């Protein structure tokens, strides 16, 4: 749907309850790729909460061919139809009534992948956020919850499997070569959770016995060629069900749970009630086709969508401004699940890395918005890292403030109080507050304010009094739509370490009686003081342990202090953070001064020393050796020095490879195993550690390491090792890289997800010729702009994960991206809009790059028939130049 000439924003302050409720909907859908006919029967009644007098019935509908409208079985023609609505001006006000509608749609013409569309030879749906209106006319808003009964009819040979939400009531053959399936969902739901899948699918099936003893049938549907890649997804689902019962007390409520893997999908997955539709990327895994990271992501996404059954489906959001009510909460739940299944330390580091590199940058961009936005033009643009990841951090802070027991008590009350309702973020916070008799009113500011708070720290130690006074202050920078910010409650986990030994110190926080080694400080005002007593020696502070709040710390310290914390901090996150900070200060310090700083030497010595230590968690050891990305380093600079940043970071890593060569080789030889097929945690840790060593050694570009990488590639018994070796060979142009790249393509040309990796490896190479490579790959026979996964693997990876080449001073990267955003605008506006992110941050760069990025954005804005998705982001981005 193309935008109106003057698109208007929708505001949270204007929310009003719907004038009508739809208690039940019956659908009779006759499926065909070219033309699907939809018969809809709606049972409606006036909403007692409506604020209007005898209102007309306005039903949403887009890209629909309307055939007939019936009111209480009487054909009518006194309705009004536009491109976006069907309006009935005269409907009963004092009783229930029915509206029957017949319309048709063309799934194969639906390249936007919203509503009902064709993915290869499969028909499937995506209705969140506003896709149901592209199937039939309805009150397409999440606070209208209905019971769905769906009859599907299709050609039995072309579409042998017919799926929808809930329970299968009936199925059978028809006389004309078609067949039918009748589904009923017993739980009222908003229409965004509706789903249909039809096609030639195979499935694996298993069972799960719930904590109350009910048997649930589990089915995963895929193309028959992919049946051998479903075992991990099934096991992940069973682990998620067991975990949710144990940790949150949530039991699955239907007798059937289905997952379908789809090759063309705009998102990662969708939690439709009882019928989850997944991007194949988050279902299909076999050790030779999927990396360890893929396995972990699959488990996390499987868990995420399953957890939505309660945090999103049974209790849903009142309006789309409350999107984080379900997404932020559920991301927190899936993060906790993955941490319990893997390593808490590594998972926390991974989550914070993503938050800092992406969400902190979003907070500094024209698209900055609160976790609960105040306005939008296109809701698809607000499925953002702020709503998801920062939303999860808000839930994590609530968990920290209330403790695990209090948080669980609050969640129990939330689910009990609001089961079957569409509610708000305030309702969630209120339930936690009421269950614990804890005033969380100030905490709600986190949901309403955009931006990343900065916490400044000042400490003063009084040796005579054995007292440490810690002064904390907070400030949140202005964002485009919010200039004035209020203080928010910020939980800061704090420990004090002995300067002499590095051991934790037992201290007393003023106002408490018993000494502790760790304290939770809650900064609620613009500035507060916290006094520690019985501090027997000058301490070293370990602040914001576990990254207990999504803030930036302003606490200048000597490089020696960071090196001390890297050696001694007992908090695994802060130990890792100390090494990251040393690296950051060494890079930014050289950019400022033009020469090496003490932090550079300390970082190099500290990293080399790490090679000689012993860690039981090998994956955590690998994290300690992994430096901050260029993307995160850029986020720390007021004006990004693209070339200087890339040059100095590369030099630092090469210096580590040279200085620590013996240790890196020793670790590699100790932990790498040829033809490794193990999938347990120790094996994953071995691979991560050996592969980071390989990546560093490859920087030396010596024949023996080229041979090492080639052997690593050729002898790999799993995709993790094969891809790591291919990346080392291609990114550093080691001898044999072209042969390995060709071999990889020839081996995996029939595996779409593996070929995505082939495209991504080339798109993220830091070599200067990568722009030409990407340009060539855009015309490659295996590239399809209409396949979101492939587009993200090439254009998304190039523009968002290869800053040194994308931000080439000549602006060719910007022009290339703009060209394809304009093509995607006509094909798939959601994907086009998501590719705009790097251009929307133009104000962070030097004047020359700013001009070139604005030029690319202006060219997009001038495109005829620009979608609302793209228009909103481009318009906000360009408007920011006057801010």
Image (tube, grey):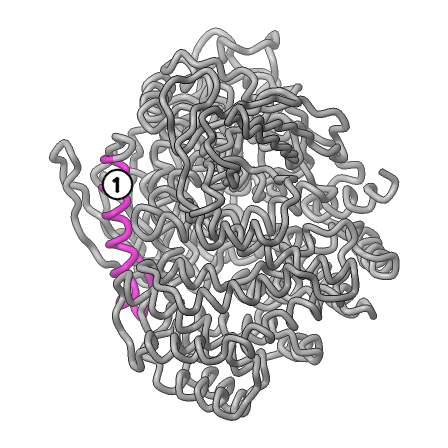
* Residue denoted by label 1: 243
- Picture coordinates of residue 258 (x, y %)? 29, 48
Q: How many marks?
A: 1
- Quadrant in which the C terminus appears: top right
| Magenta residues, start to end | 221-246
At 49% from the left and 79% from the top, the residue drawn is 661
At 73% from the left and 34% from the top, the residue drawn is 477
Q: Nearer the viewer, residue 386 or 749?
A: 386
Q: Nearer the viewer, residue 740 or 728?
A: 728
At 65% from the left and 67% from the top, the residue drawn is 649
- Quadrant in which the N terminus appears: top right
Residue 810 as seen in the image, left or right of residue 550: right
- Picture coordinates of residue 764 (x, y %)? 60, 70
- Picture coordinates of residue 330 (x, y %)? 42, 37
User: Visible in this render: residue 284?
Assistant: no
Residue 109 as seen in the image, left or right of residue 348: right
At numbered mark 1, what does the secondary structure look like: helix, strand or loop?
Answer: helix
At 48% from the left and 30% from the top, the residue drawn is 325
Q: What secondary structure prevails in the magenta region?
A: helix
Q: Relative to 854, say whether 135 is above or below.
A: above
Q: Relative to 25, say whether 19 is above or below.
A: above
- Picture coordinates of residue 795 (x, y %)? 63, 65
Does the magenta run of residues contain 70? no
Residue 489 as seen in the image, left or right of residue 250: right
Q: Relative to 123, say whether 17 is above or below.
A: above
User: Visible in this render: residue 512?
Assistant: yes
Does the magenta run of residues contain 240? yes
Q: Quadrant of residue 774?
A: bottom right
Q: Residue furthest front?
A: 464
Q: Nearer the viewer, residue 854 or 500?
A: 500
């Amino acid at each position: 749907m193309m935008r109106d000439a003057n698109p208007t924003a929708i505001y949270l302050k204007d929310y009003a309850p719907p004038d009508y409720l739809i208690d039940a909907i019956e659908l009779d859908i006759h499926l065909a790729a070219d033309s699907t006919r939809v018969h809809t029967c709606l049972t409606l009644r006036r909403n007692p909460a409506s604020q209007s007098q005898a209102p007309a019935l306005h039903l949403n509908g887009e890209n629909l061919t309307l055939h007939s409208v019936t009111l209480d079985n009487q054909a009518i023609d006194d309705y009004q139809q536009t491109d976006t609505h069907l309006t009935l001006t005269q409907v009963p006000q004092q009783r229930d009534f029915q509206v029957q509608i017949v319309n048709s749609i063309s799934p194969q013409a639906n390249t936007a992948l919203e509503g009902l569309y064709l993915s290869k030879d499969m028909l499937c749906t995506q209705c969140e956020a506003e896709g149901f209106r592209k199937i039939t006319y309805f009150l397409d808003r999440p606070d209208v919850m209905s019971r769905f009964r769906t009859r599907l009819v299709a050609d039995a040979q072309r579409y042998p499997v017919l799926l929808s939400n809930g329970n299968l009531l009936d199925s059978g053959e028809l006389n004309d070569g078609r067949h039918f399936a009748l589904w009923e969902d017993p739980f009222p739901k908003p229409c965004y959770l509706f789903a249909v899948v039809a096609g030639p699918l195979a499935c694996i099936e298993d069972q799960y016995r719930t904590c109350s003893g009910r048997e649930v049938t589990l089915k995963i549907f895929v193309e028959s060629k992919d049946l051998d890649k479903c075992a991990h997804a099934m096991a992940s689902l069973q682990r998620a069900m067991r975990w949710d019962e144990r940790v949150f007390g949530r039991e699955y409520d239907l007798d059937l749970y289905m997952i379908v893997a789809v090759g063309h999908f705009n998102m990662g997955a969708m939690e439709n009630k009882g019928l989850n539709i997944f991007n194949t990327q988050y279902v299909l895994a076999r050790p030779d086709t999927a990396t360890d990271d893929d396995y972990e992501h699959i488990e996390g996404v499987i868990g995420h969508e399953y957890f939505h059954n309660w945090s999103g489906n049974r209790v849903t959001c009142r309006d789309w401004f409350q999107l984080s009510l379900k997404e932020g909460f559920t991301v927190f739940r899936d993060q906790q699940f993955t941490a319990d299944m893997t390593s808490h330390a590594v998972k926390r580091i991974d989550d914070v890395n993503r938050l800092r590199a992406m969400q902190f940058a979003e907070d500094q961009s024209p698209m900055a918005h609160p976790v609960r936005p105040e306005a939008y033009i296109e809701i698809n643009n607000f499925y953002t890292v702020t709503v998801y990841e920062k939303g999860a951090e808000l839930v994590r802070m609530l968990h920290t403030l209330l403790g695990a027991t209090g948080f669980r008590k609050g969640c129990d009350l939330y689910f009990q109080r609001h089961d079957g309702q569409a509610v708000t973020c305030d309702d969630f916070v209120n339930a936690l507050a009421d269950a614990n008799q804890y005033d969380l009113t100030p905490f709600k500011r986190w949901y309403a304010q955009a931006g990343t708070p900065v916490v400044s720290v000042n400490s003063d130690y009084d040796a005579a009094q054995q007292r440490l006074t810690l002064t904390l202050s907070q400030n949140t920078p202005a964002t485009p739509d919010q200039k004035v910010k209020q203080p928010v409650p910020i939980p800061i986990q704090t420990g004090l370490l002995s300067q002499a030994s590095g051991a934790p110190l037992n201290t007393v926080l003023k106002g408490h009686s018993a000494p502790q080694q760790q304290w939770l400080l809650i900064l609620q005002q613009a500035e507060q003081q916290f006094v520690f007593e019985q501090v027997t020696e000058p301490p070293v502070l370990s602040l914001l342990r576990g990254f207990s709040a999504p803030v930036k710390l302003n606490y200048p310290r000597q490089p020696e202090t960071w090196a001390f914390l890297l050696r001694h901090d007992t908090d695994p996150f802060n130990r890792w953070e100390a090494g990251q900070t040393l690296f950051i200060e060494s890079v930014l310090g050289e950019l400022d001064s033009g020469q090496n700083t003490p932090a550079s030497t300390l970082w190099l010595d500290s990293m080399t020393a790490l090679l000689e230590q012993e860690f039981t968690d090998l994956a955590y050891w690998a994290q300690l050796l992994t430096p901050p990305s260029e993307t995160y380093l850029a986020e720390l600079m007021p004006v990004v020095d693209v070339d200087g940043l890339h040059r100095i970071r590369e030099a630092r890593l090469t210096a580590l490879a040279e200085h620590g060569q013996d240790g890196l080789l020793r670790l590699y030889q100790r932990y790498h195993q040829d033809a490794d097929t193990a999938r347990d945690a120790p094996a994953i840790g071995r691979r991560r550690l050996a592969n980071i060593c390989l990546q560093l050694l490859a920087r030396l570009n010596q024949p023996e390491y080229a041979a090492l990488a080639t052997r690593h590639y050729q002898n790999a018994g799993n995709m993790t090792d094969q891809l790591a070796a291919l990346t080392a060979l291609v990114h550093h142009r080691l001898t044999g890289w072209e042969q390995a790249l060709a071999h990889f393509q020839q081996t995996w040309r029939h595996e779409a997800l593996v070929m995505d990796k082939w495209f991504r490896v080339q798109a993220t190479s830091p070599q200067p010729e990568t722009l030409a490579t990407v340009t060539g790959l855009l015309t490659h026979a295996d590239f399809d702009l209409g396949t979101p996964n492939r587009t993200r693997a090439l254009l998304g990876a190039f523009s968002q994960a290869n800053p040194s080449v994308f931000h080439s001073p000549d602006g060719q990267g910007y022009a290339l991206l703009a060209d394809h955003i304009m093509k995607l605008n006509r094909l798939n506006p959601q994907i086009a809009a998501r590719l705009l992110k790097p251009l929307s941050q133009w104000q962070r760069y030097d004047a020359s790059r700013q001009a070139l990025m604005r030029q690319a954005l202006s060219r997009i804005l001038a495109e005829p028939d620009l979608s609302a998705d793209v228009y909103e982001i481009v318009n906000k981005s360009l408007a920011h130049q006057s801010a």
